[in-house]
Amino acid sequence: MTTVSIGVFPVLGPCWFSDTWMSPRAGGRRHEGVDIIARTGQPLYAVVDGTITRQFFDRPGSLGGNALRLTAADGTYFHYAHLSTFAEGIGLDSKVVAGQVIGYVGNTGSSSAPHLHFEYHPGGGPAVNPFPIVKAVDGCRSTTPPTTAAPTTTVALGESTPPTPPAA
C-alpha cells in the first residue's frame, strides 16, 4: 500500500473533475492523471513543499504545453500540465512551499478546454492514479486561496502493480 500526503488542493475553485485514469487518448496512449477543469487564469498551487525540477514550454506538437514538475524531498513528483503561464519567479530549481502559486490554468499543448492535467509519481516512479488524492482534498468549491500552513491530508492508495507473491 502506498500513502501520499498533500497539504493543498492544486487549483483554486470553482472547478470540477472526475476519474479518467487510463482513459484512451490519441496515438494509443492512456491518460495518466486527473484533469481538473477550471477557468483560464485560475491559480495553481504547490501541493507539497519541494523544488521545480522540470519546466516545459508550449511549442507546436507539445502534448502538455506549458508544464512543471514539482518534486518533494523523497523524490515523489507531481506533474502539472497545460498551464497558461508560470507564476512570477517560478522556474527550474525554484524552491516552493505548499500553497504557493506556481502557475495558472490554461489550454496549452494537446488540450481542448482550460484545465490542469495533474499526475502523481511516488518515489519518482511510474504514475499512480491521483484521483483518490484529489478527491480527498477536493477544493473545487473553495474560492479562498489556501494558507501555506494548510493541514496535510494523507491518502492510502492501492499498489500500482500487483505485489510479488512470496517464494514457495
Image (cartoon, rainbow, N blue to C red):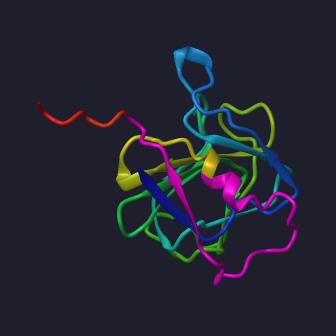
Which residue ends up furthest to the top in the rendered image?
Answer: 28
Quick one: 6 or 43, which is closer to the camera? 6
Which image quarter: residue 42? bottom right
Q: Measuring 88% from the left and 57% from the top, which residue is drawn there?
A: 14
Which residue ends up furthest to the front in the rendered image?
Answer: 168
Q: Measuring 41% from the left and 58% from the top, which residue is drawn there?
A: 76
> Relative to residue 72, is residue 144 drawn left or right?
right
Quarter holding the C terminus? Answer: top left
Does the segment drawn in magenta span residue 144? yes
Quick one: 96 or 3, which is closer to the camera? 3
> Relative to residue 107, is residue 142 drawn left or right?
right
Which residue ends up furthest to the bottom in the rendered image?
Answer: 149
Does the segment drawn in magenta span residue 21? no
Q: Position of residue 15 (x, y in %)?
A: 84, 52
Q: Measuring 36% from the left and 33% from the top, which residue is drawn there?
A: 162
Quick one: 4 or 16, which is closer to the camera? 4
Q: Measuring 67% from the left and 32% from the top, which residue is drawn there?
A: 20
Magenta stretch: helix, strand or loop mostly: loop
> Relative to residue 42, is residue 25 drawn left or right?
left
Quick one: 81 or 145, which is closer to the camera? 145
Image vertical order of residue 74 relative to residue 165, above or below: below
Which image quarter: residue 22? top right
Q: Position of residue 54 (x, y in %)?
A: 45, 55
Q: Position of residue 7 (x, y in %)?
A: 61, 71
Q: Position of residue 163 (x, y in %)?
A: 31, 37
Magenta region, residue range: 133-161
